[in-house]
Image (spheres, helix red, strand yellow):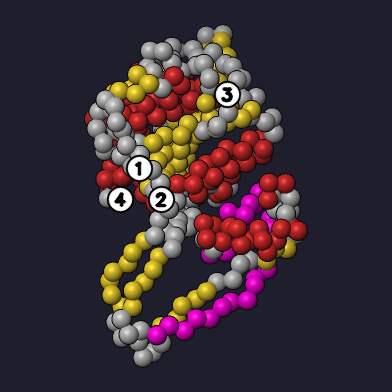
């Protein structure tokens, strides 16, 4: 997943450049592909070439600039700068021109966020470790789709409710360290809940306040578009995406928390590895006699992994059908611990970035 620093200017001392252009290349769209993934796959920067691609292919696009499977599209031209053999040296000074955005600062010691519920609405800003950072949080499924379900004590429990509770707890921790947080899938009245059984409902909304459609493809496209639009708006700010799910496997399959990233995203891989390392350390401390088998691996078949622009990690919190994994998500203290361990990995990731 290519990540872009736009408008980079090079200051040259006595160096002549020769510019060449590649002709328009033509490619065929395949199933599940959008403009962002098509450009990435062909070595083009979505931030630089998105608008040009639309201009070149405007008569060949569907609703919301969607691609038609099997149709041929023209790719934008690439300007390739080649140094002349008589060039001298290039200075090490590189300046970046970035969009002007209002700085994200925390003016108050405490802030109120009704999304967390009455008990947790007041958030103390304890430090500025993540000041200037932006995080997009997506909990899996929601709205008409509860995700994986299982019966516990004769009551139906669902993936989306538990993934959402962990996501809210993580959001609150990130805000307490001065991060800007966008909760992409949100429930207007649930908030953080300290209960074992989280009642299933279907009133979740997609950022900013859009009804979540019934079609799975439309749901995924809707949340992807919300993240990508915000990402483009914020330009070169430090931005990351965290997606949380609860897996569904055979009842006897006990799994550890594991992590996916885009195969071409070094930053996404690093984020996943940092959170994974946080989990390894916590398991070694709290369960020293138990081997932690959670993994970090690339995925190219997941829609959100393939089509979202920010560096991202996709987290599976456990198997909702397994008795041992259920303990991990049913106990609210365990959900708080899951959020805390993810948060610790995020802090380490940003510290390495600086």
Between disc 1 and disc 4, the foreground one is 1
Label 4 vs label 2: CA separation? 22 Å
Q: Secondary structure at mark 4?
A: helix
- For marks 3 and 1, the one nearer the N-term is 1
Residue 29 seen in the figure: yes
Few, some or many C-alpha atoms within 10 Å of disc 2 (few <14, some 14-19, many ≥20)? Answer: few
Front in this rendered view, residue 114 or 213: 114
Label 1 vs label 2: CA separation? 9 Å
Few, some or many C-alpha atoms within 10 Å of disc 1 (few <14, some 14-19, many ≥20)? Answer: few
Q: Secondary structure at mark 3?
A: loop
Front in this rendered view, residue 70 or 279: 70
Between disc 4 and disc 2, the foreground one is 2
> With 292 as the anchor, is 26 left or right in this view?
right
Q: Looking at the rendered structure, which numbered label has been put on residue 100?
A: 2
Residue in the image at 70% along x and 34% along y: 215
Label 3 vs label 4: CA separation? 34 Å
Assess whether mark 3 and mark 2 are in contact (beta carbons under 8 angstroms).
no
Between disc 2 and disc 3, the foreground one is 2
Which residue is denoted by mark 1 in the rendering?
103
Which residue is denoted by mark 3 in the rendering?
204
Which residue is denoted by mark 4 in the rendering?
353
The quarter of the displayed image where residue 44 is located: bottom right
Q: Secondary structure at mark 1?
A: loop
Q: Secondary structure at mark 2?
A: loop
Q: Position of residue 116 (x, y in %)?
A: 42, 20
Label 1 vs label 4: CA separation? 19 Å
- For marks 4 and 2, the one nearer the N-term is 2
Q: Which residues are magenta?
A: 16-43
């Amino acid at each position: 997943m290519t990540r872009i620093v736009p408008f980079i200017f090079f200051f040259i001392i006595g160096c002549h450049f020769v510019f060449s252009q590649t002709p328009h290349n033509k490619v065929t769209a395949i199933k599940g592909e959008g403009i962002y993934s098509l450009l990435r796959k062909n070595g083009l920067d979505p931030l630089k070439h998105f608008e040009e691609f639309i201009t070149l292919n405007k008569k060949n696009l569907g609703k919301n600039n969607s691609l038609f499977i099997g149709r041929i599209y023209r790719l934008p031209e690439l300007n390739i700068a080649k140094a002349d053999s008589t060039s001298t040296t290039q200075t090490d000074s590189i300046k970046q021109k970035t969009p002007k955005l209002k700085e994200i600062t925390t003016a108050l010691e405490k802030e109120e966020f009704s999304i967390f519920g009455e008990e947790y609405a007041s958030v103390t800003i304890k430090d500025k470790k993540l000041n200037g950072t932006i995080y997009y949080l997506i909990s899996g499924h929601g709205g008409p789709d509860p995700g994986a379900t299982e019966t516990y004590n004769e009551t139906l429990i669902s993936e989306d409710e538990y993934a959402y509770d962990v996501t809210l707890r993580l959001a609150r921790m990130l805000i307490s360290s001065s991060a800007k947080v966008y909760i992409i899938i949100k429930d207007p009245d649930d908030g953080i809940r300290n209960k074992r059984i989280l009642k299933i409902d279907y009133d979740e909304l997609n950022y900013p306040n859009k009804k979540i459609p019934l079609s799975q493809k439309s749901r995924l496209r809707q949340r992807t578009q919300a993240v990508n639009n915000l990402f483009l708006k914020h330009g070169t700010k430090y931005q990351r995406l965290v997606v949380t799910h609860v897996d569904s496997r055979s009842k006897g399959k006990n799994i550890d928390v594991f992590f996916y990233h885009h195969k071409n995203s070094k930053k996404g891989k690093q984020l996943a590895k940092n959170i994974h390392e946080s989990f390894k350390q916590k398991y070694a401390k709290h369960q020293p006699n138990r081997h932690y088998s959670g993994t970090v691996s690339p995925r190219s078949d997941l829609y959100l992994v393939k089509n979202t622009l920010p560096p991202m990690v996709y987290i599976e919190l456990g198997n909702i059908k397994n008795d041992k994994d259920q303990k991990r998500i049913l106990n609210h203290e365990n959900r708080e611990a899951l959020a805390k361990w993810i948060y610790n990995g995020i802090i380490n990731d940003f510290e390495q970035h600086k």
